[in-house]
Every structure is written in C-alpha cells, then in structure tokens.
Amino acid sequence: MKTIITKQLALWAAWGCIALGGMLIAWQIVAPANANATPVVMATPEVLVNVDVPADTPVPATPVADVVVYISGAVTKPGVYKVATTARVADVVVLAGGLRADADYAAVNLAAHISDAAHIHVQSIGAATTSAPVQSASTTLAINSASAEELAALPGIGPALAARIVEYRTANGMFATIDDLGAVPGIGPAMQTKLTPLLRFDS
C-alpha cells in the first residue's frame, strides 16, 4: 500500500514539473514579444489658431474717396484742389491760402458741402452777387480766359506749362476742344484725359 502511494506522489511530482516547465517556456516566448511592443498613443486634437490677425483687431475703415474742386475769386491761391468727400467749403478755402482782405465773408457759405468737379467762387466786397458759392460741375475752369496762375494750379500743370498754354492761346487763338490743347508742347494724351473734367472751352 505504501509503495502505491509513493509511486502516485512521484507521478504527480513529475506532472507538476512538466507543467511548470511548460509555463516557463511559454513565458520566455511571450515576454520578449511584449517587451518590444510599441505602446499606442492617442493623438491630441489639433487646435488651429490664426496668429496673424488677433480676434480683437478692428476691421480697417474703407478709405474715403477724393473729389476735385476749383476755387476762384477772393482767395490767396485760387486753383484746383483735391479734398475728401466729407470736406466743406472752409476746408478748400484753407487749402487755397485763406480769404483775401477784400473777400465778402457774408457771401460765401463756409459750411457748405463739396461735390466732385464743383466750382467755389468767393466774391470780393462790392462785387455783383452771384448764385450759390458752390456751383454745378459744368462751371469748371474756362481754358480760354483763365490766367496763368489759375492754369498752374491744375493737376500736372505748373508755372512753366501754364505759361506755354497762355502763349499758345495768344498766338493761335482760343482752344475749341481738348484735342486743340494737345498742340501745346508738354501736354500729351494722358494729361488731356486728366484735364478733360476740369476744363470748359468757352468761346
């Protein structure tokens, strides 16, 4: 009886060693594979931020367009000037060097609005009363009667070219069209295009 029990214990021990050896072999096979495995990393959501334009940056205002007006009469420097559409007659008077001592202050509305190609005429004291100081666009500079000083104030003209215009007009008679003005040395097609809305060709 004792011999049988001893044999059974020996058999169980053998099976236990076999099982333990198998487990060790399996662990040796699985462990290196797990050691070399790459861990899975969850990607972080990407947040797009516009660094060029801060969120609180104000939207730039649309630039104000310019208008061209002609001022004549009792001002220091009569001529053609470019001003903003929000300008008043007073702003143009300042650009023209201010009112002369003989200007009739009561006859000019310094608060009047400005329109493109308008003609502002400042009367002298005692002069005949005219219509409103800001007139329509049709009352532009009269090329056939304008002085050299008035012509010099036109865009791109200047004293030398203004003198040539007066000399040509004196020698050849009045200008009938803008094409006739192109006969003056120094006035080409581009200059004619620029001057067209600023001049009138009265006989």
Image (cartoon, rainbow, N blue to C red):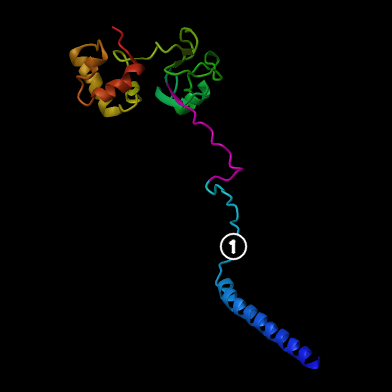
Q: Position of residue 136 (x, y in %)?
A: 44, 11
Quadrant in which residue 67 is drawn: top left
Residue 33 in the figure: left or right of residue 200: right
| Residue 148 seen by the camera | no
Describe the element under mark 1 as helix, strand or loop: loop
Q: In the image, what residue occupies the spot 59% across and 62% down?
A: 40
Q: In the image, what residue occupies the spot 32% across and 25% down?
A: 152
Provide the residue span drawn in magenta: 53-68
Residue 65 falls within the magenta-colored stretch: yes
Q: Determine the residue located farthest toward the front in the rendered image.
A: 1
> 138 or 27, which is in the foreground?
27
Q: Is residue 39 above or below residue 90?
A: below
Q: Main secondary structure of the magenta part?
A: loop
Q: Amino acid at mark 1?
A: Val
> 192 or 10, which is in the foreground?
10
Picture quarter with the N terminus: bottom right
Residue 30 in the figure: left or right of residue 156: right
Q: In the image, what residue occupies the spot 46% across and 26% down?
A: 65
Q: Position of residue 115 (x, y in %)?
A: 47, 18
Quadrant in which residue 10 is drawn: bottom right
Picture quarter with the C terminus: top left
Q: Position of residue 121 (x, y in %)?
A: 45, 15
Q: Determine the residue located farthest toward the bottom in the rendered image.
A: 3
